[in-house]
């Protein structure tokens, strides 16, 4: 099992009740939030990592096995779950009540690029092989750029640019391999984005 929960907030702003005289100079308020998040779960049988699911099925198999069943078909379990949830908030703004005077150009920009990579893989072998695999990812980007309610009219001699850009990139891979089974195999791989 791999679990990644990420929450970030990036802000750039001119506070309320702030009074500026830019003397003709440009005002730039910029917030940038770039994140890369990953969750990788590998439940392959060649891994030596402890597997609770495999142990539960091993105990169940030994309790339910009669003496005449000894030496019969074995059960192979390979389970893997990867969850990756990302929430990013990015804001650039002039807060309510701020006063900007004698500015040249004004640029209020917010940008967020979020990338999430989520991989779940597993395999099993034996007489009967069961391989459930789940990879699930979700990205939420809240990106805002704005000018609040000013105490006085905004004074700028140049251009005023307000821009908010949000890009989300998600790669989800789920792989299950039950090909090593001798008699029967059940494999399910689900990847949701």
Image (cartoon, rainbow, N blue to C red):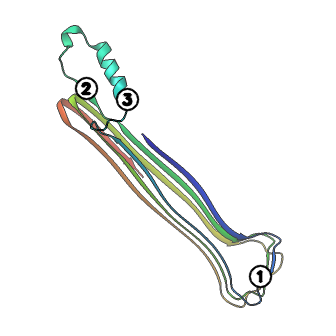
* Left or right of residue 83: residue 177: left
What element does badge 2 sit on? strand
Q: Which residue is at a point 37% across and 31% down the rendered structure image?
A: 51
Q: Residue furthest top?
A: 67
Q: Residues within 10 Å of mark 1 (few under 14, many from 20)?
A: some
Decide which of tag 3 and tag 1 comes sooner along the chain.
Answer: 3
Q: Position of residue 156 (x, y in %)?
A: 73, 87
- Callout 3: few (<14), some (14-19), or many (20+) C-alpha neighbours within 10 Å? few
Could you tell which of marks 3 and 2 lies nearer the N-terminus?
3
Residue 162 in the figure: left or right of residue 117? right
Q: Is residue 46 left or right of residue 134?
A: left
Determine contact: label 2, label 1, CB under 8 Å: no
**Disc 3/disc 1 C-alpha distance (Å):** 63 Å
Secondary structure under tag 3 reads: helix
The numbered mark, 2 or 1, whose residue comes first in the sequence reads 2
Circles 3, 1 touching at the beta carbon (< 8 Å): no
Disc 1, SS: loop
Comparing 45 with 152, the one in front is 45
| Label number found at residue 75 | 2
Quarter occupied by the N terminus:
top left
Which mark is drawn over residue 154? 1
**Residue depicted at x 74% and y 90%:** 24
Residue under the point 26% across and 13% down: 65
Q: Is residue 6 above or below residue 108?
A: above
Mark 3 and mark 2: Cα distance apart in space: 12 Å
Point out which mark residue 53 bears. 3
Q: Residue furthest front?
A: 48
């Amino acid at each position: 099992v791999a679990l990644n929960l990420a929450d970030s907030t990036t802000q750039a702003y001119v506070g309320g009740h702030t009074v500026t005289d830019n003397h003709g100079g440009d005002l730039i308020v910029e917030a940038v939030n770039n994140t890369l998040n990953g969750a990788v779960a590998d439940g392959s049988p060649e891994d030596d990592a402890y597997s609770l699911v495999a142990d539960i099925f091993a105990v169940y198999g030994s309790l339910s096995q009669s003496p005449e069943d000894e030496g019969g078909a074995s059960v192979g379990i390979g389970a893997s779950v990867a969850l990756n949830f990302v929430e990013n908030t990015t804001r650039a703004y002039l807060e309510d009540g701020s006063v900007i005077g004698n500015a040249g150009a004004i640029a209020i920009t917010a940008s967020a690029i979020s990338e999430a990579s989520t991989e779940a893989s597993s395999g099993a072998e034996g007489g009967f092989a069961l391989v459930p695999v789940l990879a699930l990812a979700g990205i939420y980007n809240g990106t805002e750029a704005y000018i609040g309610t000013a105490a006085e009219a905004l004074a700028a001699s140049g251009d005023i640019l307000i821009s908010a850009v949000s890009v989300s990139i998600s790669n989800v891979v789920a792989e299950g391999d039950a090909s090593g089974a001798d008699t029967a195999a059940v494999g399910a791989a689900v990847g949701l984005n």
